Amino acid sequence: MKIRLICFVLAALVLIPGVSSAYIPSPQYGAFELKFGPYKPNVDNEPGLTSPVYENTFDNKAMFLTVIEIDYQFWRPPGMSFGVGASVGFMQASAKSTLEEGGNSGSTDTSDYTVLNVIPMALMFVVRVDVLAEKFNVPLVPYGKIGLNWYVWWVLNGGGLESAAGEDASGGTFGWQGTVGLAFQLDVLDPMTARTFDNEVGVNHTYIFAELMWATVEDFGTGDCLYLSTDNFFGATVLAGLAVEF
Amino acid sequence: MNRILKIACILALVGSVSAPVYALQLEVVSRSDNSYGTKPPTDPDDTATLKMNLVDCTEMTEILVDFSITTDDYDTTSDGLYFFLGDNCNTGVADCEQVLEEYSGTTTTVQVSFWQILEDVTVTVFGIDGDDDDLQALCTGAATTNGTYSLWAALLSDEADELSGTWSAAVSLETDLDPPDAPTDIKVQIGDRKAKVGWTKDDIEEYAGAYILSIPTTSSSGDEDAGALQDGGSFSCSGPFAEGDEWDHDNQSISDKRVPKSGGTSSTVQPLVNGVTYQFSVVSYDEFLNDSVLSEVVCGKPWGTVGFFTDYRSAGGTGGGKFCFVATAAFGDYDHPVVKVLRGFRDEFLAPLPGGEALINGYYSVGPAMARVVGESPVLRFGTRSVLTIFAGVAWVLGACGPTGAGLGLCVLLAFVMGLSFSRRRRR
């Protein structure tokens, strides 16, 4: 009986790869990512600032960053993919405004809020190493990205765009960013569903991932800009999310 | 009373005598507003219910009840139309009160005053003789007058031994003459030309919402100067408002903001004038729009506020403050046709959309840097002009369709592309 059982299991192991080899994945063109994470900008590192205004206003809290990214994989040698990607996100910090001088002195609380809004955008070169998943059935895909970014920002106070000394509180800051990450291929959890997903919708792989992102957003040191570089963990921030390759 | 008994006798015979079938309908078609404008909300599709509140009672608000008789047999000389108030009057009028005299008019709208109804009820139910003083007292304090009264119409015929009676369905008159309690724990936070007012409603029965009342005061001093500021910059001061007073609806200086129950227990009052001291009070209302008396009165003086950017610039920050328009930079002319189309797209299509203003603000932030780069490069100017001309064409189409039409078109296009993609994959 035991021998029969062992034979059955062995046969199954042999046959399943056989089924697998019959599966022809759809062509793969790119990837889509949705990711989230904390983002603490280094506003207070701007040269010439006489007081830590971000810390004073927003209590040095990290903003919650949401990003979507789409990549086009232009070259797929065995076990790797090279692509270009574009991302856009949104994050915001909010705090109570303070009274102008001459108001009810002694009051510490107002009904107005001051809100720093940031839309980070980036163009990147992306490398994914999926040789482990493709050749060795290890569902891990390390990857790296490097590119230029442009962070658009504006500040609202009491619901309207704030201005100071006749200048509106908005602008854009250029910079660059680098990312390293590791993605876990979810296909291994339910291969049949993954194949159906590919056949029906064209999604080749699904991942959860985490990444470290370093962003230096300081107009390349030319000045006259709001500093928005990452300042969370050793100058980096951690993002995590869901990705699909299609 | 003899008239009622006579009608009751007629009704008793109705069941045993074959009668022509009358169809009698009674429905509420309108009512007049009371002077407070606090007409209790009534479902417009429910023509059989009418709500009335304390102000309706004290002001003798009138309602208009419309009836129709859909029969050719109605004879105004021999048939009589009567109105009764009470429960199940169509099965017996012994416990019902006749309101109005027998109707013999030719129009199909009859006017019934709330005062008339209340008077007829109180005479019988409460044993009051119905003089005005007693009725006023009922309006301002007797919880026993709360309830639901049914108004019926009856078409009764007494013609040559052929007795018949036809009853309408009842119209329901719901009354609530008890004002709710006033909100408590009033808090005011001042801001730039505004103030946020909060309150507690936990112990208020039948709470349906509140009005925030505000009025500027001429008082130049209050506890503010004595350093008795509460959190949010509020303080005590003297003025027209006093806790426990009735809301003076005739005082045109009072501004009110209605906050329904779904709107929570705080709201922002604006626009106010910076530097002027205002008194704030909150009045709650119930489902019948009965108002409470004024809550505790709190004062506040709106004042300009400072946000992150002002502090940033004050501390020596150099970012921001750059504005321009990319299209103008690319075409070199503010009145270029493409620039005009894009401006129209921004103002007429984008701005009304949810989040449209934020998007435009975002664009304003992006614009300066982009325009600077575009304006300095002939190649970029040419490229940007090409892209913007195509975009202006799309924007013109979107502007012509409007947001709804564009959304619908986008859905159809998306469905078409997805269908095409799905079809191609199936074939493969």
Image (tube, coloured by chain):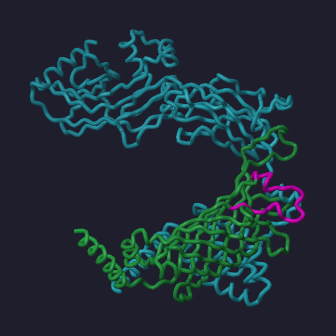
Chain colours: A green, B cyan
Please determine whether, in this image, residue A239 is positioned above or below residue B120: below
Q: Is residue B267 visible from the viewing direction of this image?
A: yes
Is B266 colored magenta in this rendering? no
Magenta residue span: A39-59
> Which corner quadrant holds the N terminus of chain A?
bottom left
Where residue A128 sits in the image (x, y, percent)? 57, 80
Point 26% across, 24% down: residue: B88
User: From the viewer's perspective, is B241 left or right of A143?
Assistant: right
Point 38% across, 17% down: residue: B121
Where residue B371 sits in the image (x, y, percent)? 76, 78
Is A52 colored magenta in this rendering? yes
Depth check: give the residue in front, A9 or B122: A9
Depth check: give the residue in front, B183 or A144: A144
Depth check: give the residue in front, B237 or A105: A105
Point 64% across, 72% down: residue: B344
Q: Quadrant of residue B265?
A: top right
Where residue A82 sits in the image (x, y, percent)? 59, 85
Q: Quadrant of residue A151?
A: bottom right
Numbered marks: total: 0
Please determine whether, in this image, residue A123 is positioned above or below residue B265: below
Point 88% across, 65% down: residue: A47
User: From the viewer's perspective, is B216 left or right of B197?
Assistant: right
Please determine whether, in this image, residue A191 is positioned above or below residue A116: below
Q: Is residue B357 visible from the viewing direction of this image?
A: no
Q: Quadrant of residue B5?
A: top left
User: From the viewer's perspective, is B105 left or right of A229?
Assistant: left
Where residue B332 sits in the image (x, y, percent)? 76, 83
